[in-house]
Image (cartoon, grey):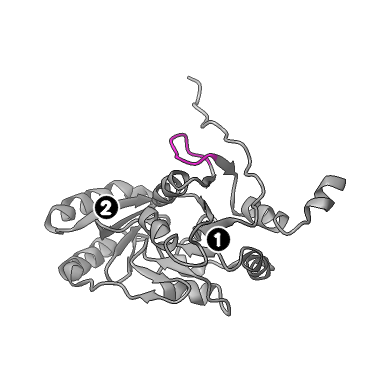
Amino acid sequence: MAVAIPPRRPPPPQLDDACALFLDVDGTLLEFAVQPDLVRLPLGALETLGRISDRLGGALALVSGRPLSELDHLFAPMRLPAAGLHGQEFRGAASCTLPRSGDALAALRLEAAQLAERHPGVWIEDKGANLALHWRAAPQFAAQVQAFADAQLPSLQGYRLQPGDHVLELVPADVDKGRAVHTLLTEAPFHGRTPVFVGDDLTDEYGFAAANAAGGWSMLVGDRANSHAQYQLSNPAAVHAWLRHQLVPESSMEKA
């Protein structure tokens, strides 16, 4: 039986100076690790991001499931505009919104910890108002994690289950990366620009759809058959190569 191969989308075009660039982090700028705190940016990535941000008048933002505090640690000493926790935290040109309380998850945290104890390799990431259940280090327990999350969801009013790459995350139902993009586009320096969203995971589909709907474009990192993305690159290394290419003068590319 032939294996279905996801369709390849064309590679992305060059950014122009009127774009606003929105970048997912894990799986897009960073390779995945067994635990999210083990990742590192490639050498030279900060300089490239800084130069692109300057070129775009500061209209470069990180849109991530991580909290702002973790993004600041990963990208130090830079403090880029960002939406953290899928859009519960914002840092734009002049605003910073703190996340809501995670009291609704208080009882669930203990049960999730017990789940991890019963299934070695399952890792619980407590983000305050969100709770992520990771099984990258123990893929044999994917079904058990899914069953646990499905059983908990009906008792969590106002929450939804966000699937990802070897992770399920319980997040407030009224936040996603698409809404985060729309929020950032309402303020300077993003307002009035052409949005470009780059991401890899199911959480990024909201961002793809938002950028497309606002007259911009979107890029998938990796392979997935069903996606709103219009363009595609294979992995984070290809993303960083594309980002560096944005700094090559057009005259040099024409000569090449």
* Residue 117 lies within the magenta run: no
| Residue at x-position 78% and y-position 51% | 250
Per the rendering, the mark at residue 30 is: 1
- Relative height, residue 71 to residue 199 (above, below): below
| Residue at x-position 29% and y-position 46% | 143
Q: Along the horizontal axis of the image, is 151 left or right of 12?
A: left
**Magenta residue span:** 223-230
Give the residue type that dot 2 points to: Leu
Give the residue type that dot 1 points to: Leu
Give percent across and percent down for residue 217: 53, 45
Q: Tell me the SS state at disc 1.
A: loop
Q: Quadrant of residue 133?
A: bottom left
Marks 1 and 2: in contact by CB < 8 Å? Answer: no
Residue reaching furthest top?
A: 1
Give percent across and percent down for residue 53: 61, 66
Q: Quadrant of residue 60?
A: bottom right
Q: Along the horizontal axis of the image, is 38 left or right of 98?
A: right
Residue reaching furthest bottom?
A: 77
Q: Which residue is mark 2?
A: 161
Give percent across and percent down for residue 87: 36, 63
